[in-house]
Image (cartoon, helix red, strand yellow):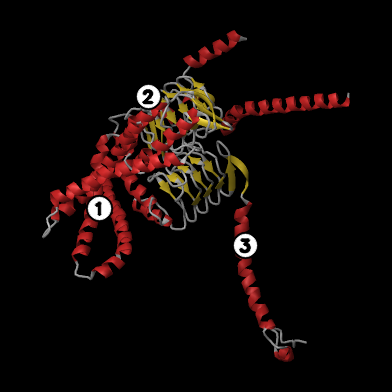
Amino acid sequence: MSVPNSMRVGPFCASVLVKKKYMILYIFLIWITLLPAILEIWWYWQLLWYEPRPLHFYVFLPLVLLIIYVSTVFAATIFTKIVLVIVNVFHKPREGTFLRDPSDKDYRYWSLRNTLKKWPTWLAHKFPFPFLDNICFKILGVKTKFSNSLFEGWVDTEFIEFGRNVVIGQGAICQSSVIVGNLLIIRKTVIEENVRVGTHVIIMPGTHIGKNCILNTWSSTIVGQELEEGWIYNGSPAKKFKRNRFFEDIPIEKLKISIGDMDGLLKKYDETRVARVTKKRKLIHRKEKEEKATNEEDQT
Amino acid sequence: MNEKIESEEKNTENEDDDSDFVIDFTTSSAINKVGLKFLLVYIPIFWFSGLVVATLWYGYVVSPVPWIIKLLFLPLLLLGFSFLFIFSCFFFSKLLLIFINLIHVPKEGIFRAERGNMDFEFWRLRTEIKKIALWLIRNWPLPWIDVIAFRWFSIKMDFSSHLNDAWCDAEFISFGKHVTVGQGAVIMSSMVVGNYLIIKKIIFDDYALVGGQSTIAPGTHFGEDTVLGAVSVTTLDQDLEDGWIYSGIPARKLKLNKYAEMRRDIIHKVDVDEEEKVETEHEVNIDEDKKHLIKHKDGVDNE
């Protein structure tokens, strides 16, 4: 029900260049967002503290603490947004493939942006209220609707667009930036309405998922993959499994059919994997050929 | 060749094939459309349980104990207060749940997942109410007490089972004894597919073991001594037989669970060993010159 520690990944980036000067900005953000909370407590104290019999003070205290937490999240997101706007003036965030090196300006600013965004998203993610997360994402510039639920999984905070009724499953990862070896790839991920992402799914940057799609558990997409509208996808990389007809009006008796043919299903699942194996075999063949060629050259 | 494929595609589109509606995949049990109206449920739970703590805190502040002793016991008291807060959250959310279940009895089955369907709406409400208390206890530094939480929400569970590191729905699940659930596993007794919500009971028998990061679909039945490997997924209504190891997506039989038999052997061995020890100790502790005094059971002298 609640996300356990092993799955509570929260929106942060796997490998971020955190420089000392970034940390100063980060701590500054934490300091400035806690100021309104202290002000609110002081104001509440002034309003309701009545020395001989502080009944009102204690009765409304839990409620006020709740409000203070929510307002702190708001303050954190707003202050971060202001800093982000200033940072984006210096260097506009853009898509593309960059070098993963401090000398690359895009990589540097991407790290800075992620470091800054960590504090508000962490704060919003730590709270059991799911809609706090949505508000935080919205202010930070992710296009989402309130009908989405993104709080069970892990979602990047820029270059992502969601339609209505999108559900990200438990432990699913939805990225718009990825580090591959020495490269940083940033590409826009678009997920259209009524998409249901299963548990532990990995969505790579540049993926475009059409309307009414379902992603099976443990499937994943590759960079820049296009998923067609109205299909159920399975496997890694995701392949068409069958047509999604669960948005139609079906008599409920039809849905109660159990999976009789288990072996057939296993075959169906295996087919999605075989293609990759053959590819590997091809690679091995190519390597063998190359080795043979080099050996022949050496002999001659 | 191309014409053939096209005609086949047309056929599949036109025909009402039953295999299209078989649910042979697994999605997630995350609820969609989290409305602001759920705040109405959260606020009273938070407020009332906060009040319990606030009254005790007031009593602590007012009490005529010297301040140095108050300071000494403060850490213990804070621990107790947070514990009290969590448990009063449980109490109030359980109270709310009882009322809600009186209005609408939770039941298994397939329902339409849309606004206006009572089963769907109440499923969401139940999930949200349970969420807050479970979230609190999951963030508490004592990992084994979340079993208490699951028991509060009337899940049949024992203290010998362990699922602290897993995601677990809090209804329609029953655990046997000594069930272990690995890190990052997702146990779902409900699942939304397209426009439909599926709720089915999951049953774990004794000594079932679930590997890390695996997903368990609604309706799965785990037999005794069944092992599900890491990164594997069960399909809807899958029945895992007794004493087998399953693995893969979807879970398939890998081999017989020999480890379970070994475990039983070890238990027997331990018993036998202890008996032997008792016998040997008698002989070892006796001095060489007095050995001739012992008589065996058959009455023959020891030489």
Where residue B89 appears, as percent x and y from the top left, is 28, 51
Q: Secondary structure at mark 1?
A: helix
Quadrant in which the N terminus of chain A is drawn:
top left
Residue under pointer 3: B266
Q: Tell me the quarter of the picture where residue A66 sits.
A: top left
Q: Is residue B17 visible?
A: yes
Q: Secondary structure at mark 3?
A: helix
Task: Estimate the spatial distance between the alpha carbons at disc 3 and disc 2, rounded to whole Å.
Answer: 57 Å
Sequence order check, earlier mark of 1 and 3:
1
**Is residue A195 placed above or below B88 in the rendered structure?**
above
Which labelled disc corresponds to residue B196?
none
x and y percent of residue A36 in the render?
Answer: 25, 43
Which residue does the image show at 39% across and 56% down from the upper left? B145
The residue carrying pointer 2 sits among few (fewer than 14), some (14 to 19) or many (20 or more) residues within 10 Å by Cα, namely some
Query: To which residue does mark 1 refer?
Result: B49
Structural distance between the alpha carbons of marks 1 and 3 = 48 Å
